[in-house]
Image: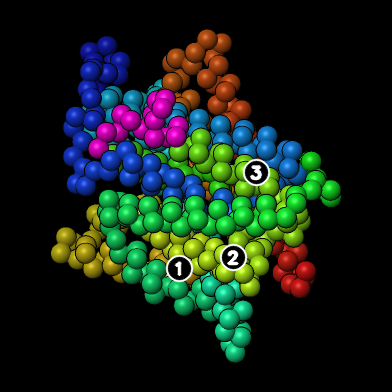
């Protein structure tokens, strides 16, 4: 990227307002942007929170969830702030996630500028792998929910979950042909309503009988804490969707601040996650599955509704996360595709990605383990490590009194690296154990 500099060689940072130069085809209102941001984080993750608390214990779970929510929210804030600053320096109306990483390195110290292209490419790959993993999780969750219903009410044909993964690929392929966030917003709104209804039904079953602390851990085994962190990070992180949502806003200046779209979203998310996590664990204990809806009774109509609602909700959410994947692939492939073939290449490419994610779901239909692996490996890098590094590089010449910004970001990056290593190690061990003992 070309950085504008003055005669002294310093970066030029005049009063350039990127918002005045943005030309968004179909801009979103604050309400629609909030709906998309909530939907990016309020997916299968919230339903996995009780399982996370079973790994950590209810006491550590509450404290850990609040801390992770604060750290994730802070990382979103610093990344968007850096992106806006880079827009002003480069005099560009908007930058996506990868462009922001590249721009921060190109503006930073000379010794880091040669890594700018690498930083942008690394961010693109990290986004691609992260949201491919999310799409795989969604495929398995939808299939698991449908299988439970069919196993109970269509007993003449009990088939493995892999077949349901294959069956839902056709409607997913059709849904993923939607190309604008504005058109996805109504689906996100419907999905949010269904998710809230599912949440309410789960709360009903949780509080249906007396809740007791007997037999429930305050703090779980240290060996299971990485699994807790992996699940919570997966559940809360939506940073890959943050830049598309902010860039598509009619009034992007409302994204940060207090109150703001991000603050409202993160506060609401933290409260819901904590409530469902702690009380879901207290109700079902160590018998929890990858999604709490899978623990609900199959014979009661409210529970059946919850299973149907979550399947539909995740189905409607799938294209929003898929949007990130397609955005990355389009930026890589579009320069090599002739203009008259781009529409067809979009259709074929979107279909191929859905089929690929479905294939992963068929090969590894273990919901909780895929969730932990994606959270530990991909979301930790995308949502914690990269924002910490990017802000440090961009503010290298002014890291605050006593270099507090540097020390703060070192802690964030080390926390992210710890989550990657420990989370992957525990999850891979769990997968191996499950494959060796499939009946356990």
Instruction: Report helix, strand or loop for mark 1.
Output: helix
Q: How is the image coloured?
A: rainbow
Q: Quadrant of the C terminus?
A: bottom right
Q: Is residue 374 visible?
A: no
Q: Which mark is residue 356?
A: 1
Residue beneath disc 3: 229
Instruction: Please give the name of the residue rendered at 75% of the width and 49% of the height, measured from the top-left corner.
Output: 211
Instruction: Please give the name of the residue rendered at 54% of the width and 14% of the height, measured from the top-left corner.
Output: 403
Magenta residue span: 250-264
Query: 10 Å neighbourhood of mark 3: few (<14), some, or many (≥20)?
Result: many
Query: Quadrant of the rendered structure where residue 1 is?
Result: top left
The verdict on residue 237 being magenta is: no
Q: Earlier in the sequence, mark 1 or mark 2?
A: 2
The reply to whether the C-beta atoms of the residues labelled 1 and 3 are less than 8 Å apart is no
From the top left corner, tell me how far across and down residue 377 is, in percent. Answer: 58, 49
The verdict on residue 253 being magenta is: yes
Q: Nearer the viewer, residue 93 or 295?
A: 295
State the separation of the CA atoms marked 3 and 2: 28 Å
From the top left corner, tell me how far across and down residue 381 is, in percent. Answer: 53, 42
Looking at the image, which residue sits at the far right? 215
Residue beneath disc 2: 303
State the separation of the CA atoms marked 1 and 2: 31 Å
State the separation of the CA atoms marked 1 and 3: 27 Å
């Amino acid at each position: 990227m070309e950085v504008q500099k003055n005669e002294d060689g310093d970066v030029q940072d005049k009063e350039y307002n990127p918002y005045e130069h943005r030309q968004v085809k179909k801009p979103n209102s604050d309400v629609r942007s909030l709906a998309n941001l909530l939907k990016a984080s309020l997916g299968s993750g919230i339903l996995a929170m009780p399982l996370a608390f079973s790994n950590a214990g209810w006491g550590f779970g509450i404290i850990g969830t609040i801390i992770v929510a604060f750290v994730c929210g802070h990382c979103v804030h610093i990344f968007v702030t850096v992106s806006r600053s880079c827009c002003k320096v480069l005099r560009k109306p908007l930058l996506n996630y990868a462009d922001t990483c590249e721009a921060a390195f190109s503006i930073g110290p000379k010794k880091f500028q040669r890594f700018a292209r690498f930083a942008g490419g690394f961010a693109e790959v990290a986004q691609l792998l992260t949201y491919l993993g999310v799409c795989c999780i969604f495929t398995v969750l939808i299939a698991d929910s449908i299988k439970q219903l069919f196993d109970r009410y269509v007993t003449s044909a009990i088939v493995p979950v892999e077949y349901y993964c294959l069956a839902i690929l056709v409607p997913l392929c059709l849904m993923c042909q939607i190309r604008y966030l504005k058109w996805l917003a109504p689906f996100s709104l419907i999905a949010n309503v269904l998710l809230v209804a599912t949440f309410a039904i789960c709360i009903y079953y949780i509080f249906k009988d007396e809740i007791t602390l007997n037999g429930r851990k305050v703090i779980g085994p240290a060996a299971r804490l990485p699994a807790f962190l992996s699940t919570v990070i997966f559940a809360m992180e939506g940073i890959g969707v943050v830049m598309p949502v902010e860039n598509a806003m009619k009034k992007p200046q409302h994204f940060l601040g207090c109150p703001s779209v991000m603050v409202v979203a993160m506060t609401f998310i933290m409260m819901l996650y904590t409530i469902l996590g702690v009380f879901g664990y207290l109700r079902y204990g160590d018998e929890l599955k990858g999604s709490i809806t899978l623990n609900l009774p199959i014979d009661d109509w409210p529970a059946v509704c919850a299973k149907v609602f979550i399947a539909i909700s995740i189905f409607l959410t799938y294209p929003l996360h898929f949007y990130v994947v397609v955005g990355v692939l389009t930026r890589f492939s579009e320069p090599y595709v002739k203009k008259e073939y781009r529409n067809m290449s979009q259709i074929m490419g979107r279909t191929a990605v859905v089929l690929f994610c479905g294939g992963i779901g068929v090969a590894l239909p273990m919901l909780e383990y895929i969730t932990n692996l994606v959270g530990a490996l991909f979301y930790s890098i995308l949502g914690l490590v990269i924002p910490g590094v990017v802000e440090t590089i961009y503010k290298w010449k002014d890291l605050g009194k006593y270099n507090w910004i540097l020390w703060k970001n070192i802690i964030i990056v080390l926390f992210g690296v710890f989550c990657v290593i420990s989370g992957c190690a525990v999850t891979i061990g769990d997968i191996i154990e499950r494959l060796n003992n499939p009946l356990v």
